[in-house]
Amino acid sequence: MSWPEPPGPLPSPAPRPPFLARASYRRRRLAEAARLAPLAGAALWSVPLLWPRGETATSSALLYVFGVWALLILLSALLARALRRPPPEA
């Protein structure tokens, strides 16, 4: 009876991800946040649809919708201002 052959060389470890500079990493995350802001706004605007009918005043729903709208405007302005800055030189 012979023993099975030993396995070949061990596979090399997975390659390490490339190092990303902190500034470029932040800039990419800001760009991703800017892309996700409309989706977040749509999700927040759909919340009043889940409220029970008749128990919530229309004025409360309108205040919520316009509050979310104002928050999205502020968020968009802040993201645009941060993304407008020139990228740092490496």
Image: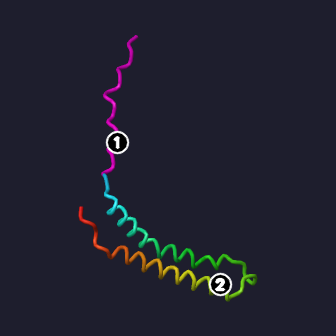
> Considering only vertical position in the picture, is 50 above or below 90?
below
Of 52 and 5, the residue lying toward us: 52
Q: What is the distance, in whole Å, between disc 1 and disc 2 at their CAs?
A: 52 Å
Asked whether residue 64 is drawn in magenta, I would say no
In the image, the segment drawn in magenta is 1-18
Disc 1 residue crowd, few under 14, some 14–19, many 20+, Cα 10 Å: few
Residue ranking furthest to the top: 1
In the rendering, which numbered label is found on residue 61?
2
Q: For residue 23, what is the image quadrant? A: bottom left
Q: Which image quarter holds the C terminus?
A: bottom left
Q: Residue at x 39, y 15 (%)?
A: 3
Identified at 34% across, 30% down, the residue is 10
Quadrant in the picture for residue 51: bottom right
Q: Which residue is mark 1?
A: 14
- Where residue 46 appears, as percent x and y from the top left, is 59, 77
Colour scheme? rainbow
